[in-house]
Image (tube, rainbow, N blue to C red):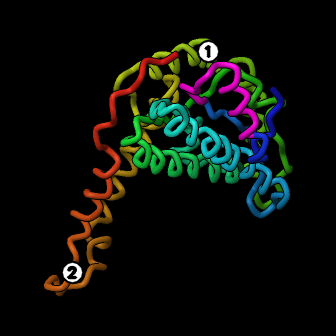
Amino acid sequence: MPLDVTNPEQARAAVSAAVEAFGRLDVVVNNPGYGYAAAIEDANEAELRAQIETDLWGVINVTRAALPIMHLMHRQRSGHLVQFSSIAGHLGFAGLGAYHTAKWAVEGFSEARAREVAPLGIKVTIIEPGAFRTDFGVSSIRETPPSADYQSTIGSLMHLFGEMAGHEPGDPAKAAQAILTIVNEEHPPLRLLLGRDAVQLARQTEQARLAETDRWEPLSTSTDFEDTAHQVDTEHVFQAMLAAGTSQAPEQEQKA
């Protein structure tokens, strides 16, 4: 049915229609999105806001519409939220600042959601695809041409998208099967990378980030107070906060 994911009322109507048709709601796949290529300085403000409204608020709106059904209606207390992020939720390319802003936010929103709803029997998986053979790099991307100062960093971006279009390594049908696999897992991953390119980029990024943490650790840790007598053990507090979302979920009903 038609759904503008930026409209919370339409999101609730779509969820209600699904429940009316099937009697319950087991899996929600949140996959709104398109790309907007522009230097942040050159970007049209309305386009920036539209990118966030669709790619982030679209996920938030549908998630908020679905959750009451999953943990309240008919005492279901089960379900699986599949939230589409991207390998762009791991790193940042020049020219895709608005897209990265939305995808990094989806990551944080969804991880927090996962910890909130785990005790209710609801699972959350964040999907992080690499390049797949869809129309993302063609009809699903908008552009504001870069000004002179940004030609060297952003000027070739759309050319690269054009060269890659139709030749991406990722097979959307296989991606769909991978998602079907994890929604039938008793203990699905919080994050699932899709595509060899995504796996390689994620590993490279995480290794570089860890190396940077190690290099700058002395400066990072030098910012604490020297007097430890009246300090809260924040490491213990943070670990407890993380553990709060990993409670054993109630036994779930079999999926319809």
Tell me: 168 left or right of 35.
left
Residue 154 coordinates in the image, percent (x, y): 73, 49
Residue 20 magenta-highlighted: yes
Up-down relation of residue 175 to residue 30 (above or below): above
Give the mark, 1 or 2, whose residue is nearer the N terminus. Answer: 1
Magenta segment, prevailing SS (helix, strand or loop): helix
Location of residue 157 by image quarter: top right
Which circle, 1 or 2, is nearer the viewer?
Answer: 2
Q: Name the residue under label 2.
A: 231
* Point 28% across, 50% down: residue: 243
In the picture as drawn, the residue positioned furthest to the front comes out as 74
Q: Mark 1 points at which residue?
A: 171
Q: Is mark 2 on a helix, strand or loop?
A: loop
Q: What stretch is highlighted in magenta?
A: 11-28
Judging depth in this view, the residue of 135 and 111 nearest the camera is 111
Up-down relation of residue 168 to residue 66 (above or below): above
* Point 40% across, 35% down: residue: 121
The quadrant of the rendering that contains the N terminus is: top right
Q: What element carries label 1?
A: loop
* Point 69% across, 49% down: residue: 57
